């Protein structure tokens, strides 16, 4: 393989210097497209989790209630308890 010598580097540098306005223009266009594209992308954040709870934990949490709640109400109370501080 041929190593890049100082002559090759100077040749590439001359090409870049000669076409610096095209290089700058292309760079600005690419950066503008990326910035505007990221600005207009929709911001979507989503998280989900699954919590498995044993039956005895549910009954110990709702033990102090006077009436025996349905499972739906028990889960609603449990969800509120877990989401609150």
Image: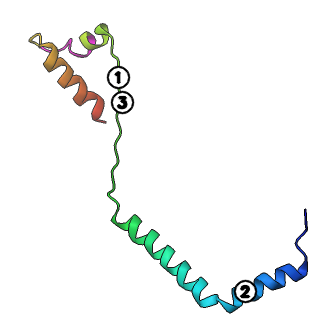
Q: Which residue is mark 2?
A: 15
Secondary element under disc 3, as helix, strand or loop, is loop
How many discs appear? 3
Decide: is 4 above or below 45.
Answer: below
Tell me, yes or no, whether the two marked residues, 1 and 2, touch with CB atoms within 8 Å: no
Say which mark, if any, is on residue 49.
3
Q: Residue at x 10, y 12 (%)?
A: 66
Residue positioned 50% across, 74% down in the render: 31
Which residue occupies the foreground of this view, 39 or 70? 39
**N-term mark: 1 or 2:** 2
Mark 1 or 2: in front is 2
Instruction: Name the residue that disc number 1 marks.
Output: 51
- Quarter containing the N terminus: bottom right
Q: Is residue 54 left or right of residue 72?
A: right
In the figure, is residue 31 to the left or right of 57?
right
Question: In which quadrant of the rendered image does the C terminus lie?
Answer: top left
Residue 7 occupies quadrant = bottom right
Whole-percent x, y for residue 34 in the image:
46, 69
Question: Which residues fall within the magenta stretch?
Answer: 60-65
């Amino acid at each position: 393989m041929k190593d890049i010598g100082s002559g090759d580097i100077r040749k590439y540098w001359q090409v870049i210097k000669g076409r610096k306005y095209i290089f700058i223009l292309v760079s600005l266009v690419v950066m503008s497209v990326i910035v505007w594209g990221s600005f207009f992308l929709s911001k979507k954040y989503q998280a989900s989790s699954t919590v498995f709870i044993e039956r005895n934990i549910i009954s110990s949490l709702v033990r102090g209630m006077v009436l025996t709640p349905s499972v739906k109400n028990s889960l609603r109370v449990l969800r509120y308890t877990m989401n609150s501080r």
